[in-house]
Image (cartoon, grey):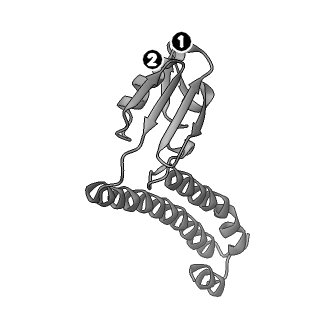
């Protein structure tokens, strides 16, 4: 086995980390209402847990308002509870068959908090990528000891 095969083996895992980070960053509120902010909130309904997007239609009506229209009226209370308890700090308002969420303007305090959240998510992704690179490096070193990979290739792989 060549070092390139080992690297190719971990590339899909590292791509998964990057796409996960991208999905997480989309969920962070920056000032414009987006369905992605709430679509993955877990709602407990009938003793089971569902992502919000499976229980309702989610849309934005304006730059700072999200409208949630549950498929069934019995979902309204669990959805409202889940949104209130989420870490997003949103206050849902029930309006007949709809749930409306008005997003406040971004404050300086929230922006600083947002930077902290962003750096935490970035650091998580870096740690995971470091882990996969470390695993690949260990395998390359083992194969070098066994004589399957040449010393020159070992250092090419490190670069």
Query: Going by the image, does 122 lie left or right of 89?
Result: right
Question: Seen from this angle, which residue lies furthest left?
Answer: 109
Residue placed at 52% from the left, 63% from the top?
129
Secondary structure of the residue carrying numbered label 1? helix
Residue placed at 68% from the left, 74% from the top?
3
Report the disc number at residue 114: none
Q: Are marks 1 and 2 in contact (CB under 8 Å)?
A: yes
Residue placed at 37% from the left, 30% from the top?
84
- Residue carrying label 1: 74
Query: Going by the image, does 108 lie left or right of 72?
Result: left
Secondary structure of the residue carrying numbered label 2? helix
- Residue carrying label 2: 77
User: Whole-percent x and y of residue 5?
Assistant: 72, 68
Q: Is residue 49 above or below residue 111?
A: above
Residue placed at 54% from the left, 19% from the top?
97
Q: Is residue 154 above or below residue 104?
A: below
């Amino acid at each position: 086995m060549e070092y390139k095969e080992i690297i190719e083996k971990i590339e899909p895992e590292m791509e998964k980390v990057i796409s996960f980070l991208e999905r997480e960053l989309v969920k962070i509120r920056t000032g414009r209402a987006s369905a992605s902010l709430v679509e993955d909130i877990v709602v407990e309904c009938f003793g089971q847990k569902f992502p919000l997007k499976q229980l309702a239609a989610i849309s934005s009506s304006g730059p700072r308002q999200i409208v949630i229209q549950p498929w069934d009226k019995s979902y309204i209370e669990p959805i409202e509870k889940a949104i209130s308890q989420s870490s997003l700090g949103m206050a849902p308002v029930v309006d007949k068959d709809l749930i409306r969420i008005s997003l406040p303007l971004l404050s300086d305090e929230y922006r600083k908090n947002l930077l902290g959240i962003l750096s935490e998510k970035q650091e998580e992704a870096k740690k995971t990528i470091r882990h996969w690179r470390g695993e690949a490096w260990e395998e390359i070193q083992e194969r070098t000891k066994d004589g399957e990979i040449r010393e020159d290739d070992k250092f090419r792989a490190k670069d």
